Amino acid sequence: MDEGTPVAGGHRRAAGGEGLTPTLALAVGGRGVVDPAEPVLRGDDEALVRGRAAFETLRVYGGIPFALAQHLDRLAGSAERLGLPAVNRLELEELARQALDAAGVAEAVLRLFWTPTPTSLALVSELPGHLDALRERGQRLISLRGVRADEPWLLPGVKSTSYAVNMAAEAEAKRRGADDAVFFDGEGIVLEGPTTNIWWRRGRTLCTPALELGILAGVTRAAAIELAQGLEYELEEGSYPLGDLVGADEAFTTSSVREVMPIVELDSVPIGRGPAGDELQAALRRQATLRG
Ligand code: PLP
């Protein structure tokens, strides 16, 4: 997920026009690198039968996945909350290395999966081709009612493969002529996007919904919080009505593949552009390309 519109020529398409970018390489626990066209899951794996598996999506810079340790931490936490066997981190790291070697590209998307059987997968795909153009133009979002995960069985902060609802929200946004969605809860409080965290700026203060709202603890969100301090912005995490986002000086999303992406419109109301998104994007790129 978090790839937005697929590049032309993506070979897997779903009914809503959404799809993954082309697969470059796949490595499977106990087998190593396999032909991506080969079946890799048992038919009775609950990942397939019930969408009960944990996954991560990472961006690869210069052949190195960004913040791999943080993504593995979150994967381990998701697996625990889903009642899956403990994640084999070393195996997943090795599979990631093998798949990236086999893909042989510097810039890519890496997905890690951990299923109940357990099966571990590392999937490398092409980076979507439209991201720089989208960053230049800015995203148009629509607000959609979402579910606030405020009970443990709503799996707050868990990144599971039950993402059909998130993809349906993204497809609805596209159907209405927008690029993506932002969820709000029954009280009109801003939550997150289907595959992004939401941010906005008020003067020198950057605001983002608090993790206590049951949203995903984005790895990019955490990186941006750190970087914002270096850029001398104040940071505020809390519970905010949608009107705060619409009335912001500027707004943007954060996510692993799309990085920091400006929002220029919400529900057809323009939102101004500003320096914070661009500064954070530049700082994130610097960090990602220096450290991996
Ligand atoms: N929120 C949701 C629901 C997501 O699915 C994602 C990523 O796909 C994010 C936020 C952003 O998280 P990250 O920065 O770790 O990619």
Image: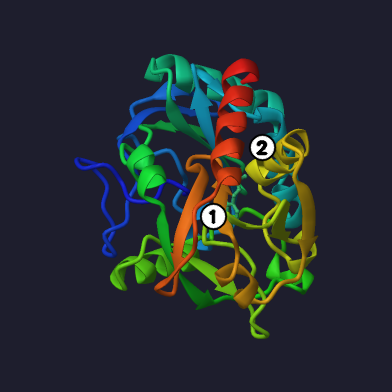
Residue 210 place in picture, x, y as percent: 76, 61
Residue ID for mark 2: 71
Q: Earlier in the sequence, mark 1 or mark 2?
A: 2
Residue 109 place in picture, x, y as percent: 45, 33
Residue 208 place in picture, x, y as percent: 70, 58
Q: Secondary structure at mark 1?
A: loop
Residue ID for mark 1: 161
Q: Kindly tell me whether mark 2's CB lies below 8 Å from ligand 1.
A: yes
Mark 2 residue crowding within 10 angstroms, few (<14) / some (14–19) / many (20+): some
Left or right, 242 with respect to 264, comes to right
Q: Residue at x 71, y 29 (%)?
A: 69
Answer yes or no: is residue 84 visible: no
Q: Residue at x 32, y 65 (%)?
A: 174
- Distance from the alpha carbon under mark 1 to that under mark 2: 15 Å
Residue 197 place in picture, x, y as percent: 61, 55
Label at residue 287? none
Q: Secondary structure at mark 2?
A: helix
Q: Quadrant of residue 190?
A: bottom right
Model colouring: rainbow
Q: Quadrant of residue 114?
A: top right
**Most extreme residue toward the left, as rendered?**
9
Of residues 241 and 59, the one nearer the viewer is 241
Answer yes or no: is residue 159 visible: yes
Left or right, 128 with respect to 42, comes to left
Q: Amino acid at mark 2?
A: His
Left or right, 14 with respect to 173, comes to left
Q: Residue at x 64, y 24 (%)?
A: 287
Q: Amino acid at mark 1?
A: Thr
